Every structure is written in structure tokens, then in C-alpha cells.
Image (cartoon, rainbow, N blue to C red):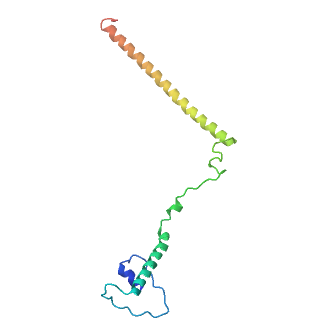
Amino acid sequence: MPFQAFRLSLGRDHLPPIHDPPSNQAQPPLKPHSTKANPSPSIQVNTQINIMYRQKLVRAVRPALQSRAAFSTTTRAMAGGDTGAPRSTGEAHGDAFTKREKAAEDYAIRMREKEKLLELRKRLAEQHDHLKKLEEHIDELSKSSGGEQK
């Protein structure tokens, strides 16, 4: 049984067309299917060979069909000494650039904290003024209602 006919009998039309290997001998004409329960051993062997051939072919083609996204999504690893690369010692030791960068970051943090502290002091002063006004208002109400009651 030719391989192409075997593929079509299994309903594998979604696979790319595969041609039978060329042979120098003329192939005998196809015989109609027999009604015997067990086909001849030569047909069984040919069928098994065709199945193995198809399995090997699918296994060979499968890696080409897999996604290639893994190659395009890998991140670039930086070597020691590249700009932005981590230090080989794991810490930011010594050079002038690292020291200046750390000093600038520390200064920026201190300035933000100073601004927050000034804002809090301003709010606290506003709250004190508000409390003083409320106390004065309470005193006025208590005096106008008939004197202090202590």
C-alpha cells in the first residue's frame, strides 16, 4: 500500500503532502481490499513501516513548528564593567562615580524629608491657631451665658 494512500485512508489531510520514496522497480497494481480477517504478513509489515516512517517524519518536523518566541524575549545580560551592570563584588565599592551617585541620592532624600518636616510643622502651627480660636470662642460663650462656672 503506498504511503500517500495510507495517509488519506487515515484522514491525515492536514499534514503536508509527502511523496513515496522513488523506487526503480515498477510497482504492482493495487489489489482491492480483501475480506479476510487477517491481511497477509507482507501488508502488515508495509503498514508498520509506513506508520514508523510517518512518526519519524512528524518528530523531525515538530521542532521547526515550535514557537521561536523564547529567543526574542531573553534579556540582555550585562558583563562586569558595562554601564548599569552590577559590581562583581556585589556591592558599590569605591570609585568616584559611585560615591558621587550615592551622595546625590542621599542629598535628594534629605531634602524630601526636610520638605515633609516643614509641611508638618506648618500644619501643626495651623492646628494650634485653630485650637486657640476654639478656646476663645468657648470662653466668650461661657462669659455671655452668665459667667464662668468652675
Q: Which quarter of the figure is the C terminus placed in?
A: top left
Count of picture labels: 0
139 in relation to 33, above or below = above
- Residue 3 visible to an observer of this rendering: no
Residue at point 58% right, 35% down?
A: 108
Left or right for 137, reference 84: left
Task: List x then y, in percent, for residue 92.
Answer: 64, 42
Task: List x then y, in percent, for residue 90.
Answer: 63, 45
142 in relation to 2, above or below = above
- Asked where in the image residue 110 lies, by quadrant, the reply is top right
Task: List x then y, in percent, for residue 67.
Answer: 48, 65
- Asked where in the image residue 45 lies, by quadrant, the reply is bottom left
Query: Camera-side residue: 63 or 149?
Result: 63
Q: Which quarter of the figure is the N terminus placed in?
A: bottom left
Query: Camera-side residue: 88 or 58?
Result: 58
- Asked where in the image residue 14 lies, by quadrant, the reply is bottom left
Residue that lies at the very extreme toward the right in this rendered image: 95
Residue at point 33% right, 9% down?
A: 142
- Residue 141 visible to an observer of this rendering: yes
Residue at point 43% right, 92% down?
A: 27
Query: Camera-side residue: 29 or 65?
Result: 29
Residue at point 34% right, 84% down?
A: 38
Left or right for 71, reference 44: right
